[in-house]
Amino acid sequence: MTSAEECRDALQKLTGRLSEMSPADRELYFGDRSISVTIPDLGVTYATVLGSGNDPVREVAPGEPPANIRLTANSDEVVALAQQPMNIARAWMSRRIKIEASPKDLIRLRRLL
């Protein structure tokens, strides 16, 4: 099992990929969309805003409103996702990752992953 700090760092790396996009493309694809990742084996949820590409990944406070895009995955899957982009559809179909998002957000998510 991976630590909570390693997962947070992996998510920061993952969202950092957005900084490689031009600001206009980031705004077009993500705007102010938020993403959260719940890691059940660690009992923690992290969130960030995707539009700027460099917002910090932070722990979600109790009672905070849900993110636009919500992922659930075990800690090892979260780190693997950040280290080597995977076929998100395959991970979802094999139930290694649970995704809750609108169809339009699912398309946006492909751009990140």
Image: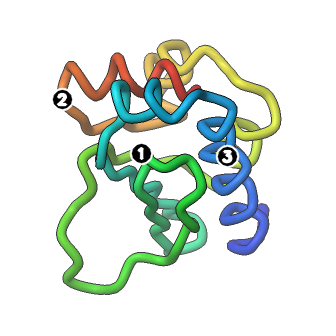
Foreground residue, 17 or 77? 17
The amino acid on which the numbered mark 1 sits, given as a three-letter code, is: Gly
Which quadrant holds residue 106?
Answer: top left
Residue 112 image position (x, y, % from top left): 54, 29
Residue annotated with mark 3: 16
Residue 6 as seen in the image, left or right of residue 24: right
- Residue 100: give x, y in percent of width and height: 27, 38
Q: Which tag, 3 or 1, sits closer to the chain's start?
A: 3
13 to the left or right of 106: right
Observer-side mark, 1 or 2, equals 1
Q: Determine which residue is flagged by label 1.
A: 51
| SS state under label 3 | helix
Residue 31 sits above or below residue 55 on the image: above
Q: Secondary structure at mark 1?
A: loop
Residue in view at x 46 percent, y 24 percent: 25
State the separation of the CA atoms marked 1 and 2.
17 Å
In this view, the residue in front, 61 or 94, is 61
Amino acid at the residue labelled 2: Ser
Task: Check the image and report above or below for 65 versus 98.
Answer: below
Q: Say if 87 sits above or below 9 in the image.
A: above
Q: Earlier in the sequence, mark 1 or mark 2?
A: 1
x, y percentage for residue 23? 50, 35
Q: Tell me: residue 4, above or below residue 76.
A: below
SS at badge 2 = loop
Q: Amino acid at mark 3?
A: Gly
Q: Are marks 2 and 3 in contact (CB under 8 Å)?
A: no
> Circle 2 sits on which residue?
102
